[in-house]
Image (tube, rainbow, N blue to C red):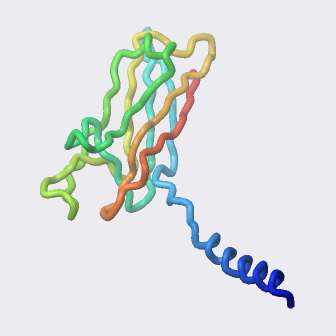
Amino acid sequence: MSAFASGVFLTLALAAPAGAQIDSPPKAVQSVRAELVRAGGGAELVLTVRLAEGFHVQANPASEKFLIPVVVAFEREDLAHLANVRYPDALEKRFGFSPKALRVYEGEFVIRVSFKSLPAPDGGRLKGILRYQACTDAACLPPAQEQFSASM
């Protein structure tokens, strides 16, 4: 075998296992379910978020300024209809990296958003984004977001 062919073979043999070792990060948010229902003259969005086992996200408001809380955001045209966002009560939980308990959400939690008028008139779709940073007891994933939509 020529030196060139040996070099190519060696490069390919070493590159294949190295590529196999690169894993994508685990999926912390398993599902985001959005349901939009009429409420008086307006509407209420019920956003149900399910986290994977072993993950938590920072509550809104977060315990510390440097922590990234869960945030629900909407497209500009839907903001005019927004009345308020009600984040759930948080769990107070201690972690080895923090001297005090932190406010977090785990498992499944529900965020309720009230609109003073219909945000998606005539059967249109309400579109939004759930922003969060998921963590385990040992490490945090990079900040992420999940898109959602709902219609009447």
Q: Where is residue 107 drawn, in percent x and y? A: 38, 53
Instruction: Determine the residue located farthest toward the bottom in the rendered image.
Output: 1
Image quadrant for the C terminus? top right
Instruction: Determine the residue located farthest toward the left in the rendered image.
Output: 99
Q: Where is residue 137 drawn, in percent x and y? A: 30, 62
Q: In this view, does 111 lie above or below 54?
A: above
Q: Where is residue 64 drawn, in percent x and y? A: 20, 43
Q: Quadrant of residue 67?
A: top left
Q: In this view, does 150 lie above or below 109?
A: above
Q: Where is residue 131 drawn, in percent x and y? A: 43, 38
Q: Quadrant of residue 73?
A: top left
Tell me which residue sits at (54%, 34%) in the image: 148
Image quadrant for the N terminus? bottom right
As rendered, which of 34 and 148 lies closer to the eye?
148
Image-based side of 91 in relation to 150, left or right? left
Tell me which residue sits at (44%, 12%) in the image: 81
Tell me which residue sits at (39%, 25%) in the image: 113
Image-based side of 47 in relation to 84, left or right? right
Instruction: Determine the residue located farthest toward the right in the rendered image.
Output: 1
Instruction: Determine the residue located farthest toward the front in the rendered image.
Output: 3
Q: Is residue 131 above or below residue 120?
A: below
As rendered, which of 58 and 143 lies closer to the eye?
143
Instruction: Count numbered badges in the picture.
Output: 0
Tell me which residue sits at (51%, 51%) in the image: 30
Image-based side of 127 in relation to 53, left or right? right
